[in-house]
Image (spheres, rainbow, N blue to C red):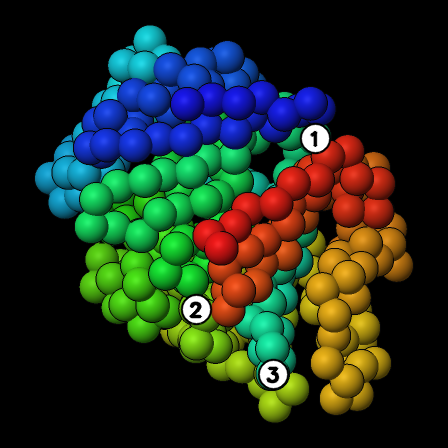
Amino acid sequence: MTTLSQNMIKKIECRGTPYEVGFIHGSAATEEIERCINFYAGFFLEKSKQSWPQVKETAKSFDLEIRAKWPRFHQELQGIADGSKRDLLDIVAINVRTEIAFGLFSDGCTSLFWHTSNHEFLAQNWDWVEAQKQNLIALSIYQDSLPTIKMITEAGIVGKIGFNSAGVGVCLNAIRAKRLDASRMPVHLGLRTVLKSSSTKEAVAKLTEAGMAASAHMLIVDGSGDATGLEFTSSTFAELPVNAQGRIIHTNHLILPHEGAHEVPWLKDSVERVERMAYLTDKFEGKEPTWPEVSRLFEDRDGLPGAICRSQELPSTSATLFNIVMDLKGKHAVVRMGKPCDVEESFKLSFE
């Protein structure tokens, strides 16, 4: 079932087997998937001088690994391809876009977990190239014996930012650290793995068992308040714990040591955004924040253009495309499309 909201984002409900889920996704988002592929074809050509046929050739090794190790994901990717009438490798390529051009992405995102007596807040601004905003979709996935998933993702990509009916949520921060291991799980499949899990501990165990193909940070939280900032490279994992104030703050650099990791300096404002969010949250001095107060943190424009609420103005090459605030204890969320300081559309996601 597909419904198109009044402004922009398409909302899609998928049910059934992995292939059926993918086919519904692909059929309902054909136009957005076409634009998404065209966007990344242009991006790879500009940033890494790879034509789309070259990108698809690179995607072949990932396709073989996914088919052998994570067949349910592969069946869903095949369903997306068939539903959108695209070649399978087109769909694999956008799902491993982080790995294909690892070290080139400059999406700067700010994420926050905040434990309070009444809420388990998990929130993020997702920042990326403005041209990709039109290709975001709100995806709900219903499958037997698995938690129901509600997430915001780029069309054609099986995992992104959101939460599930078990009260597990995840946010993503890009990390630019060199090295890649195509035998390990791609980042976006890792996000979906979290969203299939029933607890933070289960999610972390699954990811560490599989290993991750490239570098990133996932802020993983469940409704019990168990939370971790899971940093990883293609060969290491490290967990950032909740601080004394009940918070985890992360942006786009490795905070913890990772042996052998070679991180390329790329966003000066990454450190500045961590410091700014810490400053803003510390001002509460033990006072429990309300939902509107947590939401307003992500409207902060200090340090433009590379602010928490970001603008695509040089030297920043990305803008905030959406904000999500979740309460994993209450199992509901509010999504604001566009910059949260200038909302284009707002809607709720809920399991209540």
Along the line of sight, the residue nearer the viewer: 140 or 88: 140
Which residue shows up at 70% across the image and 68% down it? 274
Circle 1 residues within 10 Å: few <14, some 14–19, many ≥20: some
Residue located at (48% from left, 77% from top): 225
The quarter in which the N terminus is drawn is top left
* Amino acid at the residue labelled 3: Ser
Percent position (x, y) of residue 304?
87, 51
Residue placed furthest toward the top:
85
Left or right of residue 3, residue 131 in this image:
right
At x 80% / y 76%, what residue is drawn? 279
Q: Which mark is residue 130?
A: 1
SS of the residue at dot 1? helix
**Neighbour tally class for label 3: few under 14, some 14-19, many 20 plus, Cα within 10 Å:** few
Q: State which tag comes first along the sequence, 1 or 2.
A: 1
Q: Position of residue 67 (x, y in %)?
A: 15, 35
**Residue bearing mark 3:** 117
The answer to whether residue 153 is visible is yes
Amino acid carrying mark 1 in the image? Glu
Query: Which residue is identified by label 2?
Result: 222
Asked if residue 111 lies left or right of residue 197, the reply is right
Q: Is residue 284 above or below residue 348?
A: below
Identify residue type, mark 2. Asp
